[in-house]
Amino acid sequence: MLKQILKKFAPAFLISWYHFLWAFFGAVFYGFPGRKIKVIGITGTNGKTTTANLICAILEEAGYKTAVASSIKFKIGQKEQENKFKMTMPGRAYLQKFLRQAVKAKCEYAIIEATSEGVLQHRHRFIDFQTMVFTNLSAEHIERHKGFENYRAAKGEYFKACKGTHIVNLDDENIEYFLKFPAAQKFGYSLGISNFQTIKAENVREENSGCYFSVQGADFYLPLIGKFNVYNALAAICVELSQGVSLAVCQKALAKVNGVPGRMEEVVISPFRVVVDYAFTPNALEQVYQTLISNFQFPISKLVCVLGACGGGRDKWKRPILGQIAAKYCDDIILTNEDPYDEPSMDIINQIAEGAGERVIKILDRREAIRKALELARPGDTVVITGKGCEPWICVENEKRVVWDDRQVVREEFEKLNLT
């Protein structure tokens, strides 16, 4: 309660200085570890976690010891622990501590997901990013940043700070903004045509088992579905080429990727598919639905979707838009609870329903919603549950957390159906 009062009444400049000082004293206390390791940052609206995993996989295939700080885990060498902060880029000097541990473990690279909130709270300060990756940009956190331009500018701060290598998605409509920042070297990646020096994917082919494409004559297989994952792979390949890693090593590493927890993760494969994904932005949600429909094995297959709207109290603008997207692609729509925090859950659900129209089922209890989706599915259908991925909590009022895992709930409820 005290924390909320301070946030509401303390002047913005005072809060900003508070976060800055945390970053400064953390860097001092841990000996400025961000200057003693090669740091790769990844920023953008979607794809950061998968790209981080792919970069790590290739670097390790190349023989480098690597650390990763992502929305799902903190990894130093072969040791991993779950990210339970409910934030992609932690503050309060935790990143400095993480980097210190990575340096102490003799890691050569640290990969960090870099968020716009991280900029607002100075979490990126005193970390020397040698490489910065831009994945894509779409409307998100608009209320927090008071406009899309401010949101984009927050992402731009990373490129302003990084003077080494910039790696950018040339197919994103905001690319001109990110190309304007000076850097020692720049790499662009694309699935289209560009006059810029480009790492381009050609002969892209999507299949149920993954994606096939070629880069500079080298053939790649990526066992992840969705064209958006080809973009993530291209970003990773650019990073590796900038570090002197060969395409052959990239080929070998990407072919062995086992998937990313909570990202297009197939939990049930028969008699129908159940997929869990983190998507909570309009752009990400639409890409997930498009990918799953393109992977239908039978013409009569239908898409059953379970969704809510992540983050009570923020980004209210996108709720009816999420509903509209669900109505466009899904045959059965079940609206449910996600992370309401202190906002009434049914208010959130009703706002999504405004965009989804009449054919929705509203089930407040997320377990019951998942159970209903499984009951509606028939052989050959696909059930997709979005918004939480592998997150271990549902965040409710008064900063309480309910232990949760969409994937485990799916397994438990599917077993009760006795279909196997």
Image (cartoon, rainbow, N blue to C red):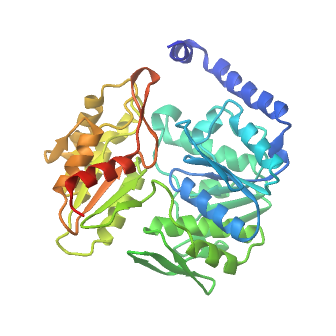
Residue lying at 22% horizontally and 75% vertically, measured from the top left: 298
Q: Position of residue 62 (x, y in %)?
A: 74, 71
User: 241 or 97: which is nearer to us?
Assistant: 97
Q: Residue furthest left?
A: 358
Residue 43 x/y as whole percent: 60, 51
- Asked whether residue 154 is in view, the answer is yes
Residue at screen point 27% across, 54% down: 415
User: Which residue reaches farthest bottom?
Assistant: 217
Q: Quadrant of the C terminus?
A: bottom left
Relative horizontal placement of residue 198, taking residue 315 as reference (left or right): right
Q: Vertical placement of 385 versus 193: above or below?
A: above
Instruction: Tell me which residue sits at (19%, 59%) in the image.
Output: 377
Q: Residue at x 84, y 31 (%)?
A: 28
Q: Is residue 13 left or right of residue 397?
A: right
Location of residue 186 in the rendering, given as x and y in whole percent from the top left corner: 72, 64
Q: Nearer the viewer, residue 335 or 46?
A: 335
Q: Quadrant of residue 132?
A: bottom right
